[in-house]
Image (cartoon, coloured by chain):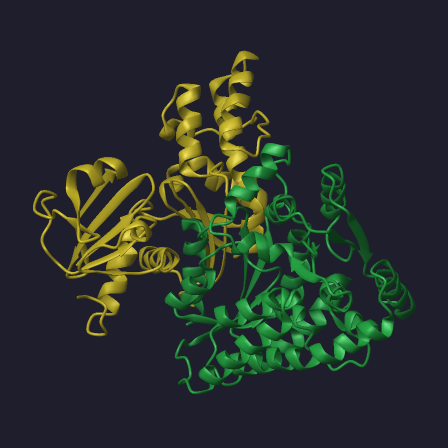
Chain colours: A yellow, B green
Amino acid sequence: MLGIDLGSRNVKIVNVAAGTVKKKVIYDTIAFYRNFSRLDNGKMVIDWALLDLPEEPVIATGYGKMAVSLADARQIPEIQAHVTGAVYQSGHRDFTLVDIGGQDTKVVRVREGRAVDFRTNDRCASGSGRYLENMAGIIGIDADELGLYYEEPVLLNSTCAIFGETEIIARIIEGYSTERLAAGVNESLYRRLSPMLKQMKSELIILGGGGALNRALGRLINEDMRVKAEALPEPQFNGAIGCCVWGMDNAGKGGAA
Amino acid sequence: MNQIAFTSTVPVEIIIAARKIPVDLNNVFISLDRPQDLVAMAETAGYPRTTCGWIKGLYAAALSQKPEGLIAVMEGDCSNTQALMETLEIKGITTIPFAYPFDRDPESMELQIKKLCSYFGVELEQAEKVKKELDAVRALCLELDCLTWRENVVSGEENHLFLVNSSDFNGNPAEYAEKLEIFLEKAKRRAACPEPVRLAYIGVPPIFTDLYKTLSVLGARVVYNEVQRQFSMPFHTATLAEQYLAYTYPYGAFARLEDIKKEIAVRKVDGIIHYTQSFCYRQIEDIIYRDQLKLPFITLEGDQPGVLDARSRMRLEAFISMLK
């Protein structure tokens, strides 16, 4: 079974056999479309051999599936894929899932293993993975290092991802330390997220998507909301894993092709 | 020429009694092949990007339509209408203010109707006579609505289109009625629609051009178009004043809630889409609807005219799959 999550920044593919993850790969979205896929009669065809992946039933999700449908694949809604993946990976059935992707953030209330309500960020990408990457670049560190800092944050107030860049340049000129600037970026991410999180609150918060690699975020959630926040073991592959789990659960019901 | 335009639903009976052609500028704007060009025209004139897309569309529609007069709803719609009216006045458009009394006071309503009658040199009796004639057309709208939610033979989009056009009857009530009658005859012979998820659509009509089609592809159908239905005046009333007091749209969230609660119960709705326009004060009222309506709820935001963006589509897809 192959699960594929066609994200805005990265394409994630997971190969599951006999209930275990055999292989997982991640590609930059643009490079993936250029090098491993082509259009055939308006449908996207993926070169599985070139990817060194077996030709198996495919379940797809993500933004990409809206632009073009994947030939010979079942497609499932993103939130369904992410919830299914999070239930499988965490072993929990009641929690709030925070998925911070490249361009958007989804906050989903999960009860008894099913999505019962959700919120998404508004139109601006500030508070998404892309925002973190850009800001880290401006400060001159990588996204992993950015995610280490949460103490004494510099106040960053812009609601727009691009104006946020201008704002942080001004703070750099004012001489703030890298640590405080990075903490400010993380705190601004949390501030964007927190109204959605409070509306969808649970006793347990589970973090998925690339943003879950930012360790400061879990700490900020925990400090402010006094609830447990934990990242999934494979946060970036959660959607693709969810696709595989959905495919296995629905095999024989038209799930797996 | 001979056209009297308006910014939001007004007592169209008075315009017709004055032998003028009613034109709802909202319909002119959104029915164009490229409504986004009108938004661009308004922005070029200086309308801020952070203003309601409908207001910008109305501005440019009024300028391109050049009506004999424009009735501007100054109370009971949004305050942007005031600046809209003023920026059109300096372009030489004659504007006529109309106000729905927020407290639903019958005397104030009667006074507004009389004022509008006297502006057009129409006797109230003439306008009331037109109301009686339009009652028959509006009865067809009511039938359309029943065929939508009770018989499930009319789609949410068909319901939307006929009801949204009932604000001005496309300028010709007789022609509108004939078209609707033919449609109803055809619809009655259809088999019931299969979509399993039943949705309520509340809020102003969508600026998105493919919302209803997308919902249908995702396996849901709209069985209640709240404001569009209100445009068709679905009440049994004796006078114009009574009719425009029963009309919920101008009287705030609580007046609308009463109607919404009643209808979503009768229509056995699974979930609610609350559509709000970017930069509109009704985005704040979302708090009230979320609090008061105890059904799965999604708030959809539209800015510029065009097809649904990927993010909104993703959200609708998740919402509908949650309801299945």
Closer to the camera, A80 or A73? A73
Above or below B278: residue A114: below
Identified at 42% across, 55% down, the residue is B313
Closer to the camera, B221 or B84? B84
Instruction: List the single residue furthest toward the bottom.
Output: B189
Question: Picture coordinates of residue B291 (x, y %)?
Answer: 66, 63
For the question of whether residue B295 can be seen, the reply is: no
In the picture, the quarter occupied by the N terminus of chain A is: bottom left
State which quadrant residue A19 falls in: bottom left
Q: Is residue A64 left or right of residue B231?
A: left
Q: Is residue A177 left or right of residue A141?
A: right
Closer to the camera, A92 or A46? A46
Question: How many circles with numbers are drawn on the protein?
Answer: 0
State which quadrant residue A188 falls in: top right
Above or below B128: residue A101: above
Identified at 41% across, 80% down, the residue is B193
In the picture, the quarter occupied by the C terminus of chain A is: bottom left
Above or below A139: residue B145: below
Question: Picture coordinates of residue A134 (x, y %)?
Answer: 41, 27
Question: Picture coordinates of residue A101 (x, y %)?
Answer: 39, 43
Above or below A29: residue B127: below
Question: Picture coordinates of residue B150 (x, y %)?
Answer: 53, 84
Identified at 54% across, 68% down, the residue is B160
Identified at 72% across, 79% down, the residue is B133
